Amino acid sequence: MFSRALGKTSLYVPLRSFSGAGAHPQKLGDKTHLETAIVGQGQYLNAGNLMLGTFCKKHPKLPVALISDKTRLVVHEFSKDLYVHDSYKNESSTGKAIFAAPKKGFFYRIDSDVLKFDPKNNKLVMAEKTFTYDHLILAVEQLYDWGKVKNLEEAVKDYFNSHVMTTAQCNFSSNVVRASREFRYGNFIYAIPKIPHKNEGTSHIFAWFNALANDKYTASQWCNSKFIITTPDTCIHRNPTVNAQLLDLAQKKGIEVKFGLQLTEIRYNNIKEYHRISDAVFKDVKTGQEVVMDYGWLATYPECKAPEVISPFLENEAIPLNPETLQHTKFENVFSFGECTNLPTINNAIAQIAQAQVVAGNVGYMKTNMPLKYHYDGTSATPIFIDMHKLIMPGFKYGWEPVSTRMAQNVDGFLQGLKQSLSFKLFAKREKKIYEKKMQGKVYGPPNWTRPNKHSSSTKTSVEPAKAH
């Protein structure tokens, strides 16, 4: 499945809505019944655009409607200002809305918020009208939950004083060098939130550490400082094999890993103050006690949540799906994929490409009253940057069964350094030519940032998280 996902692209290069290229949306008119409705919800709404392109390629003659929240489908999270990034509040200041029209397909565009879902009656309630549907695809992404960490949003906006950076800013990788230049005493803290979260599995931890450790200009500022990784869970990667390798590498480099600590508050000082060091406040998830650590630079992933409007479909804060067919366990005419589901894998951009193919195929089979023949086997992969130009990219299925990604998958071993360097170059090439085309823009990284078999082998759906060593 993974090798095919990295083959011929199933979608096309992103096109701006005024370009005129690609298929044109059909006129909706007074139509109030939708044969298939794709609802895009969440932080960036790339999943909706991905699903539309996948569905139209597989079923070019079947009518489908894309309902996009906040009147845009994809927003590039790129900022010219490396200090502050407010696209999650004001997209006009940084990002540009992009709609990637499929080359062919019979589709409608409905730029309106869904105010209420009524799955029992197959209804979508909007401000202008109410639609009914035959089949519904929830292309839902998680939302950043800024309220989970006190002062995090303020700290992100006031980077010059706080020295706090999140994935809601410019991509982590472009800030590795910048971090080494601006680090000033105190600890360097890399705070991972409770899994699952956006960008889960992708890591720049070790690239950052090496940039700081090898920078002769900041070497003297490491006196009595520590590089600390915190997580409220018992692992830093859900794949047990990958987790063991990363923990071993952290130990060799002298990086402290503190489990069971959840970031709750940031207390930062003004840069003009003599005492420049700030504090990160954590909660011990076992004892409930407060743990305070000083920092000179802090990187964190914001905690995430599913949009409240999809609550009729949720169970234990996630969309419950059949792990193979991706059909909702309660509403048989509803399908979903991606970040807000309960699928026991890492639901990142790579996984979503394969998941979208399964959803599109099975919706087509359901429309003809045939058995659902497309099966998802949990295929996913996570890029982990071992150094500035070295990368491993372990691939896996359900049960963390290894899958070849044609890239380096191990930290240590014969010629692994060379393999990691070649993998970095290959990833950079694929990132631009494959992932950007398939995802129609950005999901978890910069703007430059599978097709499965119909019959996959039986999958292992009982997955336990990795344990700390």
Image: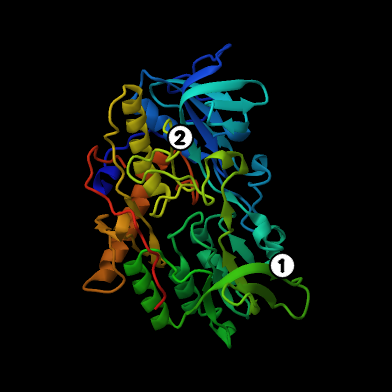
**Nearer to the camera, 111 or 119:** 119
Q: Is residue 195 left or right of residue 224?
A: left
Circle 2 residue: 331
Q: Where does residue 59 sit, x and y in percent of width and height?
A: 34, 24
Q: Residue furthest right?
A: 273
Q: Residue furthest bottom?
A: 224
Q: Quadrant of residue 272?
A: bottom right
Q: Where does residue 21 sit, x and y in percent of width and height?
A: 45, 23
Amino acid of disc 1 = Asn
Per the image, label 2 sits on a secondary structure element best described as loop
Measured along the vertical axis of the image, is residue 364 above or below residue 448?
above
Q: Is residue 347 left or right of residue 132?
A: left
Measured along the vertical axis of the image, is residue 301 above or below residue 181?
above
**Nearer to the camera, 230 or 215:** 230
Q: Please name the residue shown 51% across and 56% down the image.
A: 197
Q: Residue furthest top?
A: 30
Q: Please name the residue shown 47% across and 74% down the image.
A: 209
Q: Quadrant of residue 385?
A: bottom left
Residue 436 in sight in this render = yes
Q: Which mark is residue 71?
A: none
Q: Where does residue 146 sit, x and y in percent of width and height?
A: 66, 56
Amino acid of disc 2 = Phe
Q: Please name the residue shown 27% across and 38% down the image.
A: 8
Q: Where does residue 207 sit, x and y in percent of width and height?
A: 44, 69
Q: Which badge, 2 or 1, is on the more N-terminal residue? A: 1
Circle 1 residue: 161
In front: label 2 or label 1: 2
